[in-house]
Amino acid sequence: MRILWLCGLPFEVQERALGGGSYGAYAAWSWVMGHLPPPPGVELHIACRTSRHTQPQTLDYRDARIHLVPVRSRGRAFSLFQFDSRYFAPVVRQIQPDIIHGWGTEDAYALAAIRLAPQRHLVQVQGNVNAYRQRVPMSWITWFTAWSERIALRRARHVVAENDYSLDSVRSMVATQSLHVVEHPIRSDFLTGPPVTGQGKQVVFIGAVEERKGIWDAVTAFNQAAPADWKFTIIGNGLAPAIEKLHTTIRALGLTDRVIHHPRIEAGQIVDQLRLASVFLLPTRIDTGPTALKEAIAMGLWPVCYDNSGPGHYVRQFQFGTLARDLDPSDLAAKLKQVIAAAPWQQPEHRVKIESVIRPQFQRERIWGDLLKLYEHITATSR
């Protein structure tokens, strides 16, 4: 089967296959990287927008063919991404895919997939800007992306999401009855080797340094709840004002010697940091299905999150983790203090779940099987 994915350029590809040059990568797209390499019999092409170069480029990476597609970025949102499909059209004509999978409704990828393959497309819910805007202040530009998202979901013939929460969050915006759930795999770095020892006196936060991810509540909770001999590692980047605020807050709270901030590190380095920790703290205001949360619990860290959206879904699914009252910083700090004192991640009934229940849920081979069945269903019903 010849498959074309439309998505953003992952940092990993930019760093490892393109020499670290500035190609416009803006996110890890770690769930896409978790799918690689594809299984036998799958010819996988991935077309990624680049705003920094004017000439198309093609390269092979982990048994997938990566196509860099120059797309002028200025004003795209104002046109609701209605014209971006023309940039991807040459790749479609070249490879003639059996199906086009557009990853994400908040950018052009879903709309481009629908236009380029009206019958044989799959629209992936990667987030839900319309839902996010109801829970956290966002920039005025998201009004355009939210409008574009509604258009894409209304036009989609086939829609897939990574979990039931994510799918339910868009039901009111879709017209099709072809709705599916297929989990995302996580990168093999987080599935190999033994789980963490559970002895590490460290809390980890992984996510963008922004309000939606709850970074400010996380720092406050750590300051109020963690014993003096515990450390806090923050992994994630953000806009310059947010990074400045983070470092100012750390200094103001007297946490300079206890908090380490890594703006961006590779998967293997993240694994090294997780191995030093026991607790994963992510008090997100709203999130579809944080990849970092999945990677952390697959390694055996105990998550502490607000009881909402994707984090609540996964903590309940695995009965692994602790949920604080939604958007209640005081309860978040109280729950973190209780968790550190009780060390539930060390209990045998919880540790046994890591390799018997949690890791199998995110295995690449199993998920590709589900995804291929969905692709085959779409191609069969579109004839």
Image: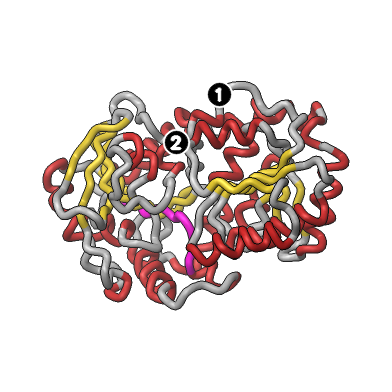
Q: Relative to 49, say whether 329 is above or below.
A: below
Q: Are marks 2 and 1 in contact (CB under 8 Å)?
A: no
Residue type highlighted by circle 2: Gly
**From which residue to which does the magenta span run?**
121-129
Which sits earlier in the primary sequence, circle 2 or circle 1? Answer: 2
- Helix, strand or loop at label 2? It is helix
x, y percent for residue 76: 28, 69
Q: Which residue is mark 2?
A: 34
Q: Which mark is residue 270?
A: none
x, y percent for residue 378: 32, 46
Q: Which residue is mark 1?
A: 192
Instruction: Indicate left or right for 308 with 142 as reference.
Output: right
Q: Residues within 10 Å of mark 2 (few under 14, many from 20)?
A: some
Q: Relative to 163, say whether 35 is above or below.
A: above
Instruction: Indicate left or right for 28 with 251 as reference.
Output: left
The reply to whether the magenta stretch includes residue 52 is no
**Residue shown at 52%/49% (left/top)?**
263
Instruction: Indicate left or right for 37 with 215 as reference.
Output: left
- Helix, strand or loop at label 1? It is loop
Say which of 339 and 236 sits in front. 236
Say which of 363 and 66 sits in front. 66
Q: Can residue 56 be seen at all in this image of the molecule?
A: yes
**Residue shown at 44%/78% (left/top)?**
140
x, y percent for residue 103: 37, 51
Q: Quadrant of residue 201?
A: top right
